[in-house]
Amino acid sequence: MSDSISLTTIQKRLAEGAPPGRVDEPTVRRLWWAALDTLQDDILLPRNPDQGIWLAAPLPALYEPRLLNCLKGWVWAPDELENLQLAHGGLLPPSRVRSIQERSYSNVGGYQRLPLRQEDGHDPLLLIITQDVQLALALQGEPGQRHLLMRSDPKTLSDLLKMLDLRLDSEDPEHAIQLRQALANLGPLQSNPELEKIFWPRLAERLAGMAPSLTLQSIPEISHPPKSREEPNQGSNAELNLLEALTHEVRTPLATIRTLIHTLLRRSDLPGVVVSRLQQIDAECTEQIDRFGLIFYAAELQRQPPDASILAHTDLGAMLTMLHPAWSQQLERRGVKLQLDITPDLPEVLSNPGRLEPMLGGLIDRTSRGLPAGGKLSMTLRPAGPRLKLQILSQVHNTKEQGSKDNDQNADLGPVLSWDPNTGSLQLSQAATQRMLASLGGLLTQRRDKGLTVFFPIAEENN
């Protein structure tokens, strides 16, 4: 029986009694990241556990150092992580390759690595057991019927632990013994019946702060560029798996740094210069977390492009106005000014506001990357027939327009990333950028020395 226990089987047990989900892959991934933040920041850390266990797949889910140091973990990870340097064509420096391998295969960082089987799938799973917090998280469901699962009832958790114990016993009996011993060391567990009443409201609060309210609507991709019907081969799938793993490895320590910064900023005895520096570091971390989040999403779209977009009425003008101050601060750190010009009283467009916000930040970064100090970036939003036209242009010393230098000089590194030899920076390839904007309702046009122009379909009133 133990040989037949896959992580997919365990997730199905977790989903028993739950209604089918109703969201798409990008939305459910967003739920997953918010759930991890809620679990660690709002539930585990306030209780300050000194021991416990956690089991996760297909990548480490915990990032908070205090939890990793006191909880014993097991992670089922993809085989691609075993050959980082070979699989990634030497893109990473050897020191970075070694650090990821050491973190993946040893107990340094709080977990032991275990092999992920093909039948396990790639849906994330996390089980946490401490003396006063016991819960399981997972994503599950068919495309278009995805959902986030959270269970904390003793019966379900007992069944999951039995199944995981059998799985470990078949793979490595020594790990199974360690799991049983770690559970025994916890002593009697205190099940908290109020856990779900804490988790779901806190999760909702986090999600409410990420995106404006929206009215969902499914529309065909009438304004999107045609999709390629070519299926990615096995090599490209391995590359996409690796890229998703690497984005996780980058975002996890950055999220840890942000958590530590927020803890420090709560203190009232810090000098003003220290607060200013911490806020600057926090802004840089947030920028890179969003940047690598876009790369992760682009890899998912490359693997499984959606057949239709779930889009919503979105006030693009209001969104640009709201985000303008943060973008201006970001560019001012490089000595670049941002000018925003929006035609008043514009209609709403159809898009996905939760995904569009970081995507617009990515376009700002893409167009401004390489601009010298004293440069200028202009962003205009105008009506254009049945669409709104968003145009981003860059200028040097207010004298000469320059578009994105992404046409002839960048070198593509696979289907998702490109490398700019002038700045040494990685960014989304033009094809990946077009594909992502298409999934958000936008049609990207890019010409040499003409910057970026994106057309969004106007939402009709009767929709």
Image: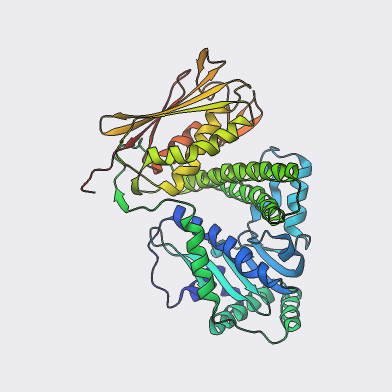
Q: Quadrant of residue 447?
A: top left
Relative height, residue 451 to residue 356 (above, below)? above
Give x and y (percent) for residue 156.
54, 81
Relative height, residue 57 to residue 82 (above, below)? below
Q: Which of 88 and 447 is in front in this view?
A: 447
- Residue 145 visible, this orientation: yes
Quick check: 223 left or right of 122? left
Give x and y (percent) for residue 97.
74, 46
Q: Which colour scheme is used?
A: rainbow
Relative height, residue 269 to residue 5 (above, below)? above
Give x and y (percent) for residue 432.
48, 37
Q: Which of 5 and 255 is in front in this view?
A: 255
Q: Residue at x 61, y 24 (%)?
A: 370
Quick check: 411 left or right of 440? right
Q: In which quarter of the image is the N terminus?
A: bottom right
| Residue found at the far top of this picture | 399
